[in-house]
Image: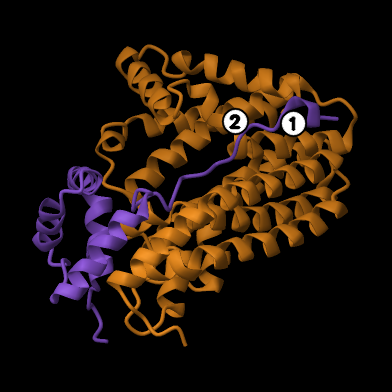
Amino acid sequence: MAEGWTSDWEKLFAKCVADPDYRARLATALENDDDTGARALLDNIGVGGTTDTVRSVRLTALKDLRVPIVDVSSEFHGGQPPMALAP
Amino acid sequence: MLDRPLSECVDRAIALLPYACRDAPASTEALVGWAARLSPTGRARDYFDGGRAVMFLLPWWLEKRIRPVPDVRFQELLVESTVSAYYFVRIVDNLMDEDAAEERGLLPLLGILHANFTRAYARLFSPDDPFWSHFDRHWNGTAEAAIREKTLTEVSLDDFIAIAARKTSGVKIPLAAVCCRYDRPDLLEPWCAFYDRFACWHQMLDDTFDWVNDLRHGNATYFLSEGHRQKRPGESVSGWVVRRGFAWGIDQLAAGMRDLRERAAQLESPELARFLEYREAEVREHARELAPKLNKVAGLADVFEPVDSE
């Protein structure tokens, strides 16, 4: 694969991370079974798929996800240990 | 874990923030407002709980290693100084990592914060005290690491240890203050060496959990650089993270923690040993919560980005 090539996954993930409005509209379309709206959003960024089979598999996978696509990272600094742990 | 007298030192240091910028009301308002916004709860004090408390805890535990009851007034000075130093570094770091418009407006505060940071040590040590050579070494090390890190487009393991994890070398300044005050130079290097390893672990923790933010801002981290090195043909770095990278990061953290616990045992600080035990369990639990979400997203990545499983 040539350097700088961006996969459809990378495009979708990057768009969802960078654009909360797009992410929200996609989530709403998926929740409401608005397949046309969801496909249009995917096509807008060029990741809808090029064949009917691929388009169908991608939409189904997104509907089945059931967790926010960007919910895979969280700044984590830990909590305060309970005082009971203190000597 | 934060002994009550130490916790009260932190309370007082934060309560003194409005007085940090004498005769400069606009600066005071800017500093206090920013410090509150920095904290997820909106309360500046809460920002220094959890993992960040280690910058106060290590000098406290080091003093307890030397004498049973730390000198609270001394520790109070260290904490006040450390809070100013932390805010100084935070402003610089945010400016260098992200397009931080708010921090740009705070640049004039850096002088005030630096003055408050050094004032405590100027009270404690005469100008010719050996403490100041430690101060210079560790404070310069912080700047050096931040400058060098920005030149990196890819972070190797050597870069990570020598540069990325040294951005918080300033934490070793209060450790030096404790050792110099009680004339225990023998303890300084082992505690500093421990801190260097802890800083690596903590930076790895940040890199592993905050990878989306780093990817978005184009920050070169060791974790994401490893993604570039480990990913398969046709696989993106984000695909690598959700499929295997996060698990790799957690494995690295577990190995790092084993090493830290062995080193901590030699420092003869039971509180430090318990702190590490707690942190290890906490990270394990957090990773366990995140793992199922990652698995689901990895399934989606497979659909949009099929890669050879080798």
The mark nearer the N terminus, 1 or 2, is: 1
In percent of width and height, residue B90 lies at: 44, 40
Q: Residues within 10 Å of mark 1 (few under 14, many from 20)?
A: many
Q: Nearer the viewer, residue B291 or B11?
A: B291
The hue used for chain A is purple
Determine the residue positioned at 39% across, 49% down.
A71
Query: Residue B49 got which mark?
Result: 2
Q: Chain of mark 2?
A: B
Label 2: few (<14), some (14–19) or many (≥20) C-alpha neighbours in 10 Å: some
Q: Is residue B144 visible?
A: no
* Near-viewer residue (B3 or B167): B3
Q: Say the numbered circle drawn on residue A35.
A: none
Q: Chain of mark 1?
A: B
- Check if mark 1's residue and mark 2's residue have beta carbons within 8 Å: no
Q: Nearer the viewer, residue B69 or A23?
A: A23
- Residue visible at 36% across and 55% down in the picture: A65
Badge number at residue B1: 1
- In 3D space, how far apart are the residues under numbered discs 1 and 2 (Cα atoms)? 10 Å
Count the numbered circles shown.
2
Amino acid type at circle 1 is Met
- Asked if marks 1 and 2 fall on the same chain, the answer is yes
The image shows residue B282, relative to residue B121, as above or below, that is: below
Judging from the image, the colouring scheme is: by chain
Please indicate, yes or no, whether residue B28 appears anywhere in the rendered image: yes
Task: Output the letter for the chain in orange.
Answer: B
From the viewer's side, name the closer residue of A53 and B5: A53
- Location of residue A73 in the rendering, given as x and y in whole percent from the top left corner: 43, 51
